Image: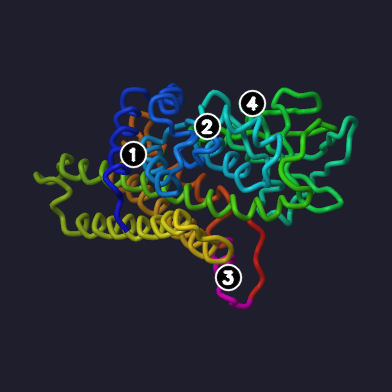
Amino acid sequence: MRFTEEQEELRTAVRQLLRRHPGEEAWSPLAEQIGVAGLAVPEEYGGAGCGAVEAHVVMEELGRELSPVPYLGSAVLATQALLASESGPERAALLPGLVAGATTAALAWAEAGSWDPEAIRAEAVPGPGGGWLLTGVKEHVLDGARADTLLVAARTPAGVSLFAVPGEGPGVGREATVPMDATRAQARVVLRGAEGGLVGADGDGGRVLRRVLDLGCAALAAEQVGAAARCLELTVAYAGERVQFGRPIGSFQAVKHRLADAYVRVESARSAALGAAFAAAGGARGPELTRLAATAKSVCSEAFSEVAGEMIQLHGGIGITWEHDAHRYFKRAHGSSRLFGPPHWHRARLAATLGLPGPVPVSR
């Protein structure tokens, strides 16, 4: 699995832009100058016609900088949910703005700490004028407090379906939460008879969400790899500068072993993440993609947590101060490990695709 010259140029462009535009201010130039919001969108909808590998490249670079831009929530989850749904007026109305980065959308999906479509209890009933009225509570909605549109998963008599709900519409209550990782904006959304339009086919939301879960896990795994690699870079550099007993700590055999182990974890995680990305780009779907995406999410979550922990340990006291970024990576590692379900849930999903026995635990 090799990146093309164009994909490497994309990486360079994103990295340079993030250095010039730190924090949230990076979103507009990322969308306008590089077109990241439409990279994985077919050309017929105004996108670049690329795929999961290009999204992997972008997510790696965003992970390195712990960037707070709404790429994962809007350009991956929400946009891919629209693309996975049957064509309809809502998709045609929403995609142009999302592709241009002029608007953002958030996928309101998780309930009671679970990302399993079977756990959805929010309800939708027919409303006046052919619309729908939604009631329920959604948690961990990425960038949900500021998104222009909410794509809400709710149950109808036909099953789980998706609905487009204006973020500032009547009956919509949004509250920004305070997660451990302050660089990943999340919200709690309360719907009390909120008006929404059906996206795709009624009852098709479960299939769409399973597809989005796999693509989201593949993208998040890439972010975890980028962040873990940055942790290792910073720690190796510090080990060459920090002197104890008259010599750099990186010259001690015990430290060398720990850094070598961290390197193996990062590269193993990179292989798992790339496997999922290239499979998705190659058209993999269903159990095949689930197997690779679940593997990537589990492996990359644990690798990032371990490497971020080593970063704290090898930096010593400075690693837990506000003056150093180590604690920020450690918090991102913890938060991303739980996002879309913890590693043990994804291992159970993997086992299910292999036909292995055993119950699938909840994704809390």
Query: Which amino acid type is shown beneath numbered disc 3?
Result: Thr
Disc 2 crowd, CA 10 A, few/some/many (<14, 14-19, 20+) = many
Q: What residue did someone put label 2 on? A: 99
Q: What residue did someone put label 1 on? A: 319
Query: Which amino acid type is shown beneath numbered disc 1?
Result: Gly
Residue located 82% across and 38% down the image: 135
Residue 353: mark: 3
Q: Is residue 356 magenta?
A: yes
Q: Which SS class for mark 2?
A: helix
Query: Which amino acid type is shown beneath numbered disc 4?
Result: Asp
Q: Mark 3 or mark 2: name the one nearer the start of the chain.
A: 2
Q: What residue did someone put label 4 on? A: 148
Q: Position of residue 152 (x, y in %)?
A: 71, 39
Q: Position of residue 24 (x, y in %)?
A: 46, 25
Q: Which SS class for mark 1?
A: helix
Q: Which residues are magenta?
A: 345-357
Query: Which amino acid type is shown beneath numbered disc 2?
Result: Val
Q: Is residue 24 magenta?
A: no
Q: Mark 1 or mark 4: name the one nearer the start of the chain.
A: 4
Q: Mark 3 or mark 1: name the one nearer the start of the chain.
A: 1
Quadrant including the N terminus:
bottom left
The span from disc 2 to disc 1 (Cα, nearest Å) is 39 Å
Camera-side residue of 249 and 152? 152
